[in-house]
Image: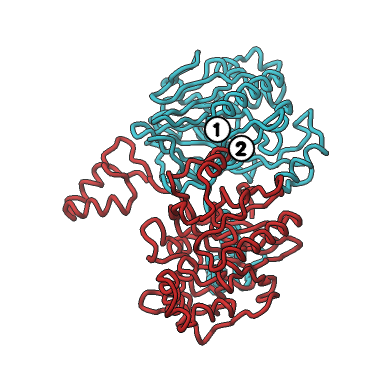
Chain colours: A cyan, B red
Amino acid sequence: MTLSRRDLLRSSLLTGGAGLVASMASLSVPMPGFAAAPKAGVQTTGAYRFSVGKFEITALLDGYIDAGSDLIPNYDPEVAEQLYKDQFRTPPVDKIRVPINSFVVNTGDKIILIDSGTADNMGPTLGQFTDNLKAAGIAPESVDAILLTHMHVDHISGITSKEGKAHFPNAELIVHKKDWDFWHDDSYMSQASDFLKTNSANAKAMSAPYSKRLTLIDKDGEVLPGIEAVALPGHTPGHTGFVLRSENQEVLIWGDVVHFTALQFQHPEWSIAFDIDMQQAEQTRRRMLDWVSADRVAVLGSHLEFPGLGHVARERDNYRYHQSSWQYQL
Amino acid sequence: MTLSRRDLLRSSLLTGGAGLVASMASLSVPMPGFAAAPKAGVQTTGAYRFSVGKFEITALLDGYIDAGSDLIPNYDPEVAEQLYKDQFRTPPVDKIRVPINSFVVNTGDKIILIDSGTADNMGPTLGQFTDNLKAAGIAPESVDAILLTHMHVDHISGITSKEGKAHFPNAELIVHKKDWDFWHDDSYMSQASDFLKTNSANAKAMSAPYSKRLTLIDKDGEVLPGIEAVALPGHTPGHTGFVLRSENQEVLIWGDVVHFTALQFQHPEWSIAFDIDMQQAEQTRRRMLDWVSADRVAVLGSHLEFPGLGHVARERDNYRYHQSSWQYQL
């Protein structure tokens, strides 16, 4: 981005002062403007590609949220600060920056979307899923299936517009039966917390346009060629992982098994208050960490640092996360 | 990228068979085409931004090269394979994938380019610097200064065309006097290896258009506001690092102190055969690793895994590299 002072003045002359501000905001030039060398002010992309065998996967960033550390009942500030220091991180004070990632898998035959971001439901640092999907050159009409790890607001909101129109007109919706039933249980939800009520209303509204092309998963195993469902209960009752396998390579898309990249590998017992069953979520997390570290399975996470791809190693009594390095060639 | 079969056929009809192949190659659709769901086949970007205080830095990828392990005289395949395994890497057999990175620093007042890739001098997996500079929205005319860490072919080749035209018409060229003198020493070069001869000829040709706007560094210290030169001799006689400082943040651009991200933090004694003085290069590497690990200074490397940004921690007798995680907000 190189925006000259003349461009700014011309914009101002054409549209007036408010237009100048709008123009500068949309071009991401920081206020106040007229610097000698305007900065871009935004990251270059929110999409990143990699291969797993013949599958091409595109990670799509929806944005980030600065979550309060009070969301982790077991949070110990001194322990956390040491972990941040060891990892050369400088998080905002009392906040933990958490990205929200979705994924598109191109198997060569089918295009499959896994989760879909927040739309405009969670504030201005989020909601970039649709733009990043477009920037990655993936047409909504080309998507054959949508797999949901679960139906929380930050995973389902990108599939349908506020007006109830399906964004993916040709896609089958595939979600675990236990998750579908939980969020559609009106009698349970009428007694539930506002957090659950809001999520239930949103899950019902977002999934409604897909009711005639819906597949409910009720057991582990293949859901599409090369893609296998694995029940990961705890975060939600029907929280589901998907193992992608192609040409002797595999990756586990584990949804919300880990929310905090800097903390939960060393402290798997630090569950998040959003878990429906925090103890079961911890058991599931430990079971997955055991498996992927023992078998060296790559993991892809909804909330692992973007693009969300890495490996897990055992370290002392717990684990260590290895973010994958840049993939130069697909 | 969604390219329909009809688009391909139309391209074929318009241009003939060869045109079809060329069109497919330029659109990065893998051969053979006509898959139900064409893959993109290439990474989404070769540019990545981050902030250091008020400075906005853009890392630009030129591409990668698969270097033979025989370039490291101390290379021990068993030791290396264990390091690859520990880091979940699967390098090509007997090869080490090495990226080539350049950087643009926008200080808010000046735009400064640091190194410039290979142009078309090192084969088809490289030479993307100019395209990535453009994709990042940085106009060559806006660049005020070019700092070179040294004058090797993979650092200087992007500043001037084959026809001898400066790509950066308004930029001052700043390089260490010892590097300039070394590559311009015709009497020494007439007796030197082909590798040195080729690099000398290229360095002279690429730098020639800047001879009237040239600054030679002859001591450590500030070269531009907020940018300090640090002599890092060994790889070349005038190999130079640049420390960027803004608002109590700093990063050391250390050029070629490390060529092999997976190996040289654990084995600083594994110098590369391209070093003019391998022993001095090792001493410089150890000195920098000591400094940045003790003072927790961020490093930015020409050959660290793209985008090249990380930190170094002491580990046992040696070091460990921490690749920085994604920067969501600049």
The amino acid type found where label 1 is placed reads Val
Where does the image place residue A198, in percent across and percent down from the top left? 65, 27
Disc number for residue A299: 1
Cα gap from disc 1 to disc 2, whole angstroms: 9 Å
The amino acid type found where label 2 is placed reads Leu
Disc 1 crowd, CA 10 A, few/some/many (<14, 14-19, 20+): many
Point 56% across, 67% down: residue: B277
Point 26% across, 54% down: residue: B22
Write down the chain letter for disc 2. A
Q: What is the quadrant of residue B88 in the picture?
A: top right
The residue beneath circle 2 is A304
Of B249 and B148, nearer the camera is B148
Disc number for residue A51: none
Reply above or below: B8 against A111: below
> Regarding mark 1 in the picture, which secondary structure is present there?
strand
Q: Are marks 1 and 2 on the same chain?
A: yes
Of B73 and A1, nearer the camera is B73
Asked whether residue A176 appears in the rendered view, the answer is: yes
Label 1 or label 2, whichever comes before in sequence order = 1
B322 sits left or right of B77 in the view? right
